[in-house]
Image (cartoon, rainbow, N blue to C red):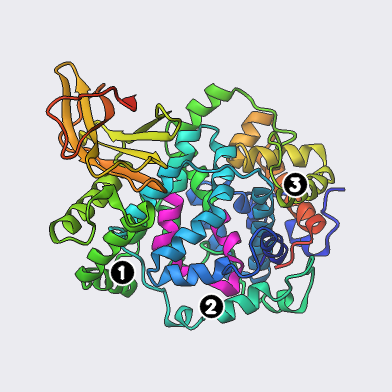
Amino acid sequence: MTGTDKPGNDLTGNGSADNPADLAGAYALHALSADEAAEYERYLARSEQARIEAAELSDTAVALGLSVAPVQPSSPLKASLMAQLATTPQLAPLTPAADAVTPAETAATTDAPPAAIPIGSASARGSVTAASAPVSSVDPGAGVEQGSAGDPSAAVKGSAGGAAAARAQRRWFQRPAGYLVAAAAAVALFVGGTFAGQALYGDPSQDFAQEQAASLAEINAAPDSQRASTQTADGQAATLVWSGELGLSAIIVDELPALGDDQDYQLWYIGAAGPVSAGTFDSDGSGTAWRVLDGTMSAGDTVGVTVEPAGGSEQPTSDPIVAIQS
Amino acid sequence: MLDLMTAEFDLDASSTAPSKEELLARVADGDQSAFGELYDQIAPRVLGLVKRVLIDHAQSEEVTQEIFLEIWQTASRYESQRGGASTWIMTMAHRRAIDRIRSSQAGRDRDTKIGIRDFAVPYDHVAETVEVKIEHERVEKAMSRLTELQRQAVSLSYFSGYSHREVADHLHIPLGTVKTRLRDGLIRLRDELGVVS
């Protein structure tokens, strides 16, 4: 029951250390070092049969991954991601051909046999020659992903030297207007268009929203980014994300109730010197309200939120609805 | 191409929801709302896998964030003829999780933290939905058809993030033997699961 009885398996030999085909399993499981993977990919480039095997074993590994129980991410994760999109450039397609694949075609090839298990279905078979390798492995361009560990921007830098990178840069830097819209969209998407209760589309506040989105992205991308979660007095989930290096923090609260026109939520940094105002905000009572705090966070500061008369107070006049220590 | 997975995924999406492949194509064009929708559809799968490998929740969320930024950046490189969007994303997710283990102290910390985990049966979570449960049972059944030695090697690599050299060290067996076990094990799984490229 070892599987070695499969005809396609002949070139495995008996596991001789020198046979690159032996690396097929380890490669699909990401169990090779970068050098070993590169060696195997050189072999893949020479062997159609090996490419088919690599694609199949990679898909088999994915089946293992899909058998794991899902875990729901915390809500700040999505907020942070969406905020970062505005400032994260996208790569251009590698080849014009890639552009030619329309969503309709995509659906047709991948969803063609929607029912039960399409083992050996015609469409799946037909794709064998096209699917010459697992995504992101053989293609020299896609290979940049391999080197991008831990640094998403490396994927961009990694493709330097290619025309694609130049196109990507051009595409990105030539659309400043798109940036403004994108930043606003990132914010609007998360807070249901009621970003911190301030008029998002007003002239100065759009800049404010954009700064806020950029700051949130910056905090989340910082190497020392941390977060702590708790509940407000009324039980809403509240999360503080911060970076000590940047001296910045942001608070994110789910379903924070709306206040009347005569009141605002006010943020405080509470350190050795007592509470220092860090700005005000509002909530429309649904979705996620978040705000990057004004001022500079010091290590160990507690961030508190109080309800204050509209416009805020010099010092807190009520008990905090939530307090989180950084 | 992992059609069976695509079909399985369709179970938990309403029939009118755009497919992940469609969403990915829109993401490639810079569509942020499509990205949000794709995230909603697959982020729990991604985090589930990453956390299975990394154990630590906060670190797993960081890596999940990196993965989704990479999806945003490289969506234009996704080629649908090479396989479904889930396959593309889950492959990327696993590679990122492994990269994290290898690139930092994380791997060693993690080993210290969890000790030597039970690797023979890589399922220590209760499946949360019918779809996941079905898939889980299908894979578990397929895994049961491997030899104990193959299953051990595959689990150590895929779920615990050991390199094949680390598997060899850990099990005190020659590297060549590990290579064979990993390959034969995956081939066996492929056949049991009916994965056809």
Q: For mark 1, what is the residue?
A: A165
Query: Helix, strand, or loop for circle 2?
Result: helix
Q: In the image, which disc is placed on residue B125?
A: none
Q: In this view, does A92 lie above or below A268?
A: below
Residue B78 seen in render = no
Image-based side of A292 in relation to A132, left or right: left
According to the picture, the residue beneath numbered tag 3 turns out to be: B133
In the rendered image, residue A249 lying in the magenta stretch gets the answer no
- Of the two numbered discs 2 and 1 on the same chain, state the one appearing first in sequence: 2
Give the image location of residue B106, x and y in percent: 46, 32
**Looking at the image, do the residues carrying marks 3 and 2 touch, with CB atoms under 8 Å apart?**
no
Label 3 to label 2: alpha-carbon separation: 30 Å
On screen, residue B155 above or below A269: below
Look at the image and tell me in which quarter the C terminus of chain A lies.
Answer: top left
Give the labeled residue for mark 2. A103
> Camera-side residue: A233 or A113?
A233
Q: Give the range drawn in magenta.
A: B66-91
Work out whether residue B135 can be spotted: yes
Picture residue at 45% right of the left edge, 30% below the top: A235
Q: Which residue is drawn at 20% across and 30% down?
A: A297
